[in-house]
Image: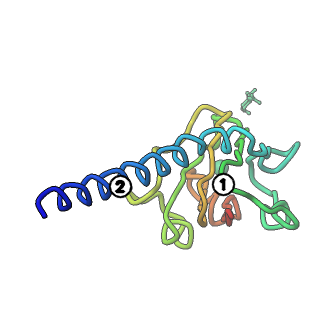
Amino acid sequence: MAGRGRGSASSVAAAVLCAASAVLLVVASAPGADAAGATYLVGDAAGWTRNVDYGQWLAGKTFHAGDMLVFKYNTTYHDVAWVSKGGYRRCVVSPKGRAPVYRTGYDAVRLPAGTHYFICGAPGHCQAGMKLAVKVY
Ligand SMILES: *[C@@H]1O[C@H](CO)[C@@H](O)[C@H](O)[C@H]1NC(C)=O
Ligand SMILES: [Cu+2]
């Protein structure tokens, strides 16, 4: 009886180990999938600036997890903040944002699945339409 008990315990242990290895394999393959993502220059030639209709720029595009957005802009005037939904709606760079504010003038961000919100933090720019909500599949 004791022997049988130990036997099933090791079978269970083997099954758990097996499941754990399967999970590890899936996790290990994720970065490779990301590396194959598409890259989008936000606003195309105009870049990240005022007087661009980013809703129109988004039209017809489908984003997938691992895709990259590149924000190209003049740092004299603009920056990029990855904000919360509320930050996007109210045009505020809140502490609940996803990342620190980017200021290099050429910022590439890798998109995870979900909906992500970007605004320019310069006064009045977000209100004037310098904002982007991206749905990522
Ligand atoms: C950014 O704007 C300033 C002021 O108009 C200008 O002097 C500078 O050349 C611009 N920089 C770039 C990279 O376009
Ligand atoms: Cu701006």
Disc number for residue 65: 1
Residue visible at 31% across and 58% down in the picture: 12
Judged left or right of residue 73, residue 2 is: left
For label 1, the SS is loop
Q: Amino acid at mark 2?
A: Val
Q: Amino acid at mark 1?
A: Ala
Please identify, in this view, whether the residue under mark 2 or under mark 1 is nearer the observer: 2
Q: CA distance from mark 2 to mark 1?
A: 29 Å
Disc number for residue 16: 2
Cβ atoms at labels 2 and 1 below 8 Å apart: no
Judged left or right of residue 62, residue 1 is: left
Within 10 Å of disc 2 (Cα), the crowding (few <14, some 14-19, many 20+) is few
Residue visible at 47% across and 51% down in the picture: 23
| Residue 35 coordinates in the image, percent (x, y) | 69, 38
| Residue 8 coordinates in the image, percent (x, y) | 26, 60
| Residue 70 coordinates in the image, percent (x, y) | 72, 41
Which of the two residues, 60 or 15, is positioned nearer the viewer here? 15
Residue visible at 40% across and 50% down in the picture: 20
Within 10 Å of disc 1 (Cα), the crowding (few <14, some 14-19, many 20+) is some
Judged left or right of residue 12, residue 120 is: right
